[in-house]
Image (spheres, rainbow, N blue to C red):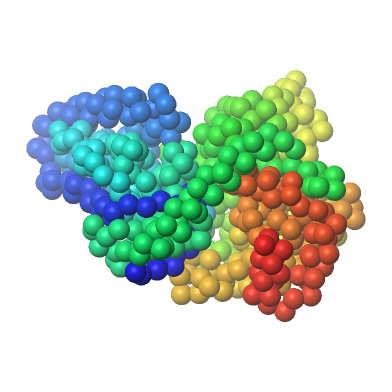
Amino acid sequence: MKIIQVSKAASAGIAAGKAFFYKPVDLKASAGLVAPGQTGAELERYRRAEEKAKEKIGVLAKNSDIFQAHLDLVDDPALRDGVVRRISEKRENAELALQETAAEIRERFEKLDDDFFRERAVDIRDVCRTLMLALKGMEENSLAGIREQVVLFADQLTPSDTAGMDLRFVTGFVTRTGGENSHVAIMARSMGLPALVGVGDKIDEVAAGDSVILDALEGRLIVRPDEATAALYAGHREQYRRHLKMLRQTNGLPAETTDGCRVRLYANAGNLEDVKKAAAEGAEGIGLLRSEFLYMQSAHLPTEDEQFAAYKSAAELCGGEVVIRTLDIGGDKSLPYLPFEKEENPFLGWRAIRISLERKDLFRTQLRAILRASAFGKVRVMYPMIISVDELEAANRVLRECEEELARQGTAFDADIKAGIMVETPAAVLCADELAQRADFFSIGTNDLTQYLLAVDRGNKKIAALYDSFHPAVVRSIRTVIEAGHRHGIPVGMCGEFAGNADAVPLLLGFGLDEFSMSAARIPEIRYLIRGSSRKEAQGLAQRACRCASAAEIRRLVEKKGK
């Protein structure tokens, strides 16, 4: 028996079966150019492949928002225009034009310092694979023939891969790459299948046909378990099944502690599809709508009307409050139609609010669209990467100017719209009192705050262990921000991953966090934990945590509380 410890559990649960390794068919494009007079025929061949791909995806889209989004990607101007240009101008065959265009788009997403948007590269890969199969006249259904209970292992899985599975036999997923915000992770959660993602080379320690137990609660794989271990985990599976039933029963109840402290549970969203799903998971609103999806999925700067339509849809779909973060893009997140100069340290460079305040034309367009959408629902605007009062006041001046313009034009908007900031820099923490006097709300972005406080690049695998939001510096900074907000009468939320961390719940309750915003799938579990907690007890624990000297001490403290 071998136990392999991993970390990323994309979908919780326990599964068992034989290891089945999935290897998709190689779909490399045929090389070569077409004759000058054949480009028209090649364009027509690609058009027919589009129609075939849309027909195939359309069947799946009837029951899945993910595949509805894939349908939109087939028609995406950035993809289609890129393929057409390569065929027409470079005389590449349709397969090669698709392969090269898709690679360019994927690279754009993979470079982003945002796990959510990096995962969108997988969707591009999936859609382009469907198009390539259509161009080659091939079908792929290698997972349909599984007839025994297996745990599926793969370098990467796409939604199209999972669509061909027979869930009577596939009990869970393990992938070499990927993250918890990928569509395949979302699908695993929706299907109730345990999944471990991003396990890296540890996947090579398992051989095809090995009996395995996938423990996506503790983040481990047990290879060739003995009888006693297999029986133990069978009991764990039943216990977890009962726990899920209890979560479903409590998810419609208020997020209120045993001593009457009520908090708000919101969801983070990267597109309209996520907004739809949030309500189904019990979210009371959207605490972070990443507006970048409009820019990343377009071949041009989104117009005011295009942005307005998306924000209006979000406000109407949500039913609750929607916090729209203004454009958070920069030196590490270039757009083909908005190039950036190469920077030595892009994480510290020209990005987020700095771009908006310099390119006020872009900022005004976005703020006008957000203001117009505020007439159709409860909308708040949030500025990213604020480091000073000057920046906040400058951003608010542009917002007021846009309000005045719309008022003169007779365009409806919420005249009392709230404008707040993401607190994600050490400067914002140290200036929290001054900022709280001018902001309508705070939302703590623990992902970047942890990175900047600890001087740890969260994308650098060599120092990944140093990136820890339980570090005393981070925990004490969270307390500082919440206390400053409350001193000046503004609500404080959190939209970083820490808000969805079960171990962090007593700390955040103890500090007085007003709003938890997280991946929608985490809401039932966090609600259950909050309803079983005492605010008074949490306050005592949070005070003790701030006296701890290390992240390990804080973790031991909160883990002891959870037992």
- Taking the image as drawn, is residue 420 in sight? no
Left or right of 4, for residue 479? right
Look at the image and tell me in which quarter the C terminus lies.
Answer: bottom right
Is 103 in front, or is 490? 490
Q: Based on the displayed image, in which of its 4 quarters is residue 316 positioned?
A: top right
- Taking the image as drawn, is residue 477 in sight? yes
Q: Which residue is farthest top?
A: 410
Q: Is 117 above or below relative to 427?
A: above
Q: Find residue 121 and report its horizontal and vertical position in percent.
A: 39, 48
Q: Based on the displayed image, in which of its 4 quarters is residue 385 positioned?
A: bottom right
Q: Is 300 above or below relative to 319?
A: below
Q: Find residue 264 and report its horizontal and vertical position in percent.
A: 74, 42
Is 92 in front, or is 381? 381
Q: Find residue 143 and report its horizontal and vertical position in percent.
A: 25, 42
Look at the image and tell me in which quarter the N terminus lies.
Answer: bottom left
The tally of labels here is 0
Identified at 45% across, 31% down, the residue is: 65
Left or right of 441, for residue 48? left
Is 333 in front, or is 131? 131
Is 5 in front, or is 41? 5
Q: Find residue 262 and report its horizontal and vertical position in percent.
A: 81, 43
Identified at 82% across, 54% down, the residue is: 535
Q: Is 327 above or below relative to 283?
A: below
Identified at 41% across, 63% down, the residue is: 228
Identified at 62% across, 32% down, the residue is: 279
